Image (spheres, rainbow, N blue to C red):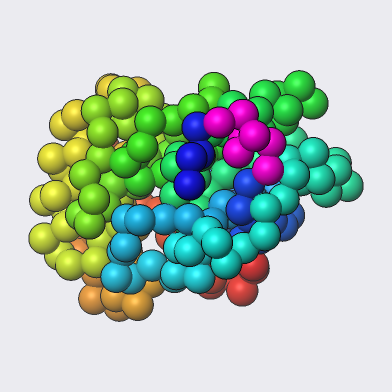
Amino acid sequence: MDTSTKTASLSLPIMEHFYTIQGEGNYTGRAAYFIRIAGCDVGCVWCDVKESWEAQKHKLLPITSLLKEIKKTPTDFVVITGGEPAMYDLNELINLLHADNYEVAIETSGCYELKGNIDWYCFSPKKFKDSIPEAYEKADELKVVIFHPTDIEWAEKHAEKVKPSCKLYLQTEWSKQNKNLPLIVEYVKHNPKWRISLQTHKYLDIP
């Protein structure tokens, strides 16, 4: 599928979209409208939204229809996630949101060039597919999921490449939290440049 054309950017394969509370990372606790775009070739074994991987299983939705739904809520913040949203040309979507004064963030693995002028770039690198240099340059937030204790050392290698202003977060993979969270707590206490990201929406049972 050619995701670089204007036609592709006017309609996107949307798995789901909903108004909720951001549960993790820098904007934890902030009301946000989530747009989850289907399609991903990164293949994280622990991914909790594997149903988003195959774009063809989800209907194309006009971005104007998305905007109408967003306007029904009082939000001022939109999060574009996936899947891997940077696989698509997001210029039209982001420009449409900016025209109505929404602040827009993206959550991406950094494996693809971002097409769109985003307000907040959350970079979450994965071992399953290499990130591109642009991701380190654009990252406002580096959020590394810790599945195995050695992933902390791997996270440090990414932290060395981002800009000094980038916020650094370590987040345990949900099924491994009993094992990994104590390790992350101690690591952050000794390395305070890092912060802990928790999936608070799962603790609170918020979609």
Residue 58 vs 193, above or below: the answer is below
Q: Is residue 6 magenta?
A: yes
Q: Residue furthest right?
A: 72
Q: Is residue 190 visible?
A: no
* Residue at position x 26%, y 33% in the image: 132
Q: Residue furthest front?
A: 1
Picture quadrant where residue 71 is located: top right
Query: How far across and down, in percent of the image, does residue 120 sit?
Result: 51, 31
Residue 78 vs 149, above or below: the answer is above
* Residue at position x 73%, y 28% in the image: 96
Figure quadrant of the C terminus: bottom right
Give the left or right position of residue 124, taking residue 13 as reference: left
Could you say which is closer to the camera, residue 7 or residue 126? 7
Picture quadrant where residue 191 is located: top left
* Residue at position x 68%, y 43% in the image: 11
Bounds of the magenta segment: 5-11
Query: How far across and down, in percent of the image, does residue 124 sit?
Result: 35, 46
Q: Is residue 171 visible?
A: yes
Residue 88 vs 36, above or below: the answer is above
Could you say which is closer to the camera, residue 183 or residue 9? 9
Q: Is residue 103 magenta?
A: no
* Residue at position x 64%, y 34% in the image: 7
Query: How far across and down, in percent of the image, does residue 30 sit?
Result: 64, 46
Query: How far across and down, in percent of the image, does residue 55 sit?
Result: 52, 59
Could you say which is closer to the camera, residue 90 or residue 187? 90
Give the left or right position of residue 65, taking residue 201 as reference: right
Name the dominant secondary structure of the magenta segment.
Answer: helix
Give the left or right position of residue 32, taking residue 178 as reference: right
